[in-house]
Amino acid sequence: MSEDTSMQSIGTRPVTVERAIPVTYDLGNLSVFDTNMIDSDIMSSTDEAKKEVYLQSLARDSAQLLVNQVLALPVVTGGRTGGDVNHNDGVFVKLPDPTTQLPREKPIPVAKPLTKWEKFAKQKGITPKGRNTGNLVYDEAKGEWVKKWGYKGKNQEEPWLVEINEKAENEDGEESGNMSKRTKKSKK
């Protein structure tokens, strides 16, 4: 069976649709609003199949009008970018902003009242400290990451002046008894 005969048996309809009253479009929401009258004779009849066919034809015509309007919009060709990957999916249409305001499912959330501490902090200009600042800093002298404070931390400074007892100095010129713990460890 050829394509022409199969399409005729299905009953193709024209792409252009005429309405007595022009319909309104909201292309941002992909909506068509048809204010034309519905045939009351067909809708009041007891033949359910006839009603179904009539409603399907109205829905098909409205969908065809919407598709015609969408295809009349300016076309964007080429790829689109999504993160680090470039997609070259084909031809796109940029939809305009919606004109119909849609209702929300739930009411707009109410802002929580400030706690006493938050009110005080706002009044005094106190800002919260960054939580994830980390405990390590880079020590340029050592060339490695060390803790900011505490055991082997960056805040541990070597004494810049060390008293040397002349009596305790041995013949090599080194201290014997008054050596600081750090110098003893470093010499071992």
Image (cartoon, grey):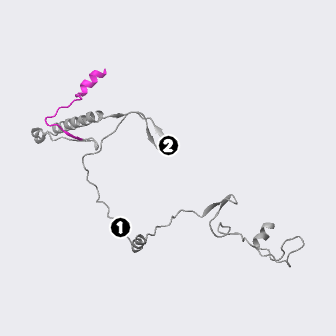
The residue furthest bottom is 167
What amino acid type should be assigned to the residue bearing mark 2? Asp
Task: Kindly identify the amino acid type of the residue bearing the numbered disc 1.
Answer: Lys
Query: In terms of depth relative to the viewer, which is nearer, 115 or 31?
Result: 115
Q: Most prominent secondary structure in the magenta stretch?
A: loop
Task: Tell me if residue 99 comes above or below residue 75 in the rendering.
Answer: below
Residue 140's disc is none
> Would you say residue 165 sits in the magenta stretch?
no
Looking at the image, can residue 1 be seen? no
Splitting the image into 4 quarters, where does residue 142 fall? bottom right
Question: Going from the N terminus, do you reach mark 2 or mark 1 first?
Answer: 2
Where residue 104 sits: x, y (%)?
Answer: 28, 55
Label annotation for residue 84:
2
Rendered view: 128 above or below 11: below
Q: Quadrant of the C terminus?
A: bottom right
Q: Is residue 184 above or below residue 21?
A: below
Residue 70, horizontal then vertical, whole percent: 29, 36
Picture coordinates of residue 128, whole percent (x, y): 47, 67
What residue is disc 1 on?
Answer: 112
Badge 1: residue crowd in 10 Å (few <14, some 14–19, many ≥20): few
Q: Secondary structure at mark 1?
A: loop
- The residue segment tinted magenta is 1-25
Nearer to us in this view, 187 or 85: 187
Q: Quadrant of residue 143?
A: bottom right
Secondary structure category for the residue under label 2: loop
